[in-house]
Amino acid sequence: MPKPMIGKELPTPYPTPVNEEDRLRALAEYHLMDTPPEEDFNRLAGLAARLFDVPITLVSFLDHDRQFFKANVGFDVCGTSREVSFCTHAIMGDDVLVIPDAAKDPRFSSNPLVLGPPFIRFYAGKPLKTPNGHKIGTVCLIDTKPRDVFTSEDRKILSDLAALIMDRMEVRRLEYVRSVSQDRFENIAGTSPDAIICSNLKSKITFWNRSAERLFGYTSQEALGRSAEIIVPDSWRKIYDAELHHLCNDEELELADQTIELSGLRKDGSEFPAEFSLSTWQEGNTTSVGAIVRDITERRKNEEHLFRLASLDALTGLANRSAWRECLDETTQAQSPCTVILLDLDGFKSVNDRLGHSAGDAILKEVAARLDAVCKMATMVARLGGDEFVALLPGNDERLAKVIASQLVSTISAPYSFAGLKCEIGVSIGVALGPQHSPRPEELLSAADLALYRAKALGKGRFELFEPALREVAIARRSFEKELRLAFEHGEFEIFYQPQVSTIDQRVVGAEALMRWNHPKRGLLSPVSFMDVLSQKPTAGDVGDWVLRTACTQAAQWRAVIPDFRIGVNLFEAQFHSGSLLLSVRDILEKTKLPAQALELEIVENVLLKDNAYTLKLLQNLHDLGVGLAFDDYGTGFASLSLLKRYPVTRLKIDRSFMRSVNTDPENAAIVQVVIHLGRIFGMEVIAEGVETTAQLEFLQQNDCAEAQGYLFGKPMTAAEFQEKFIKATPV
């Protein structure tokens, strides 16, 4: 039986630099991927949001198949796949990449981040370039409405922000290198743009790099052997003496492993603002002290300039139904300028369910009082019903509407109390202006409702102003949905297959069937580009049946060569609700002559969490038929052990997110070991996804995980390629 081999790499659906491998190595040197948020990066991201008046800013680093957000404002996720990333296009050039309107750009018009949350329309990204010229990420600006203008001054400001971020990253990189190895530290220090100084327990300088010569004015010969106090001005001499005292008494430095801003003293007696990063280490019986010193004169100037700009930035913060409608009718008929602010409470139902309707009523009264207090100038404040409120304000000034909406978000979201219990709810707000958004009352309220829907879609607890782009996005989405419908009718979908192997001898035991879309204009698209939209369409069930039929037909042919070959097929949730899944599976197995045990249906968590009698009975019937049932991405959601006991699952699939760092992250390693152990306890098979290195494979072997799939054995490929690499029998 032929063993799997790493085949020729398929072209990626996104652009990659020619020096991609070198770029990835440069990224790894900064040790920033999957690290927690840090104040320096968050502060600069927040500054960018204020400077450019955008709802979303990101500091993004691009790994080989994903992007990780080290800092973000307004987009509460830690990253995305690289295929949908705008930033992967930005690193292809040196200058700022500007996308005035993503909905009209053929590269991005069907991107799920454009058609769905966060509804990207405008993008500007500046590459983060290392001193060696590798572009490892970006600082980017995102707006939910198009922007026609991004000036040369805007480009300069964004470039200055990128320089500040790289400045922080360089300090962080050198601190990491220093902590790993003193020898390596000194080798890199020789070419570092920062002054790097080492001294011994007696404060005598033992290392002085070229940058220290340039910064302080002393040559290496002049500095070596002298006291480190030559760089210490009077302004912090007491701090220096105190730290030296700690060192001489075998005590830890108070400023060790910190980055602080102090003044540096040059040979000519002048002082300059500097950033000092200090640490200590043991070499034998001797304690050494290291300092990275960076002249931050230019940075201070840049920061002061940027914060001055930020201070000039626009502020971005925010009767019954029949009486309200009458008032709105009168206002619009008189052609009076007005503002409609539509409010819907977030989390109100849970308060009602938990504390009862008496508490709910009390909170609604308090909301009304707070709304009335903020909107004292309102023509009318009304409750439309349930937890929906509305205010009609005179005038149509956009800035004033945003200020009031922001005040309402903070005021109404403040805690409530009832019978000594504290309650918390939020609010989502939609704003529309008359007559520019519509002179008609029904359409004006509809505009506010569309804006309210956008606010909820973007995470709730915020406000949004109506804009024509909202309807444009809806039109674009309908167009994309039509393309999807025609794609199925025109046979543009294709099934790719990724090998699944035995970890013992890497023998192919099966494959997972994965959808691809051969788009007539955009080329080959992976599911991340279209699956969320497709799964919500009425055709999802039919597409799912086609995938199942195609995969089973192919598996039956390959099983003639590999008798125990198994095919895994992902199910759409719509197939569970169709009422015909069991009959479809029986019919397909009968027509393709594929044994039931050769088919494994992959189920996602949200199907099992429904926990209803119908789903349980359906899965039990499939199990009785002999079909395997695999729990996909186990461990990434909220699934409990009771689900494994309740449902007839036959295999657990370990998600690739745990495998990515299984050899370096003890927590991920423990999760993988636990899932393997759970499989053993519950009598289930286990397969690990995303295996890309021999080290990961060895970990699985050591922990008795029977099967694996991932790039180490083969990427998803066409049936013909799979046939050639792993079957090699009769033609497909």
Image (tube, grey):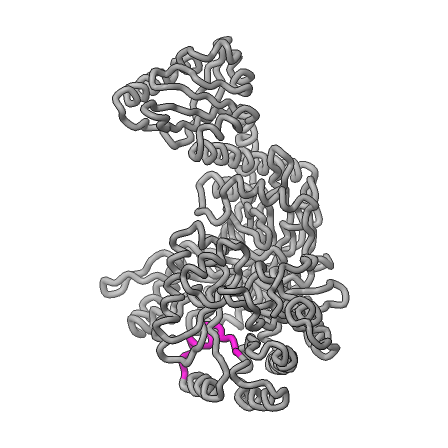
Looking at the image, the residue that sits furthest to the front is 1
388 inside magenta stretch: no
- Of 38 and 130, which appears nearest the observer? 130
x, y percentage for residue 606?
46, 73
Above or below — where is 517 with respect to 671? Answer: below
Q: Is residue 427 visible?
A: yes
Quarter of the picture containing the N terminus is bottom right
Residue at coordinates 54% horizontally, 24% vertically from top-left? 190
Looking at the image, the residue that sits furthest to the left is 420
x, y percentage for residue 467?
63, 60
x, y percentage for residue 702?
42, 59
Above or below — where is 533 with respect to 184? Answer: below
x, y percentage for residue 161?
58, 37
Quarter of the picture containing the C terminus is bottom right
607 inside magenta stretch: yes
Query: In screen coordinates, is 584 left or right of 243?
Result: right
- Of 684 and 353, which appears nearest the observer? 684
- Of 80 and 404, which appears nearest the observer? 80
Residue bounds of the magenta highlight: 600-612
Residue at coordinates 40% horizontally, 27% vertically from top-left? 278
- Of 501 and 268, which appears nearest the observer? 501
Q: Which quadrant of the figure has residue 652? A: bottom left
Q: Which quadrant of the figure has residue 282? A: top left
Q: Is residue 465 visible?
A: no
Above or below — where is 160 with respect to 380? Answer: above
Query: In screen coordinates, is 176 left or right of 361?
Result: right
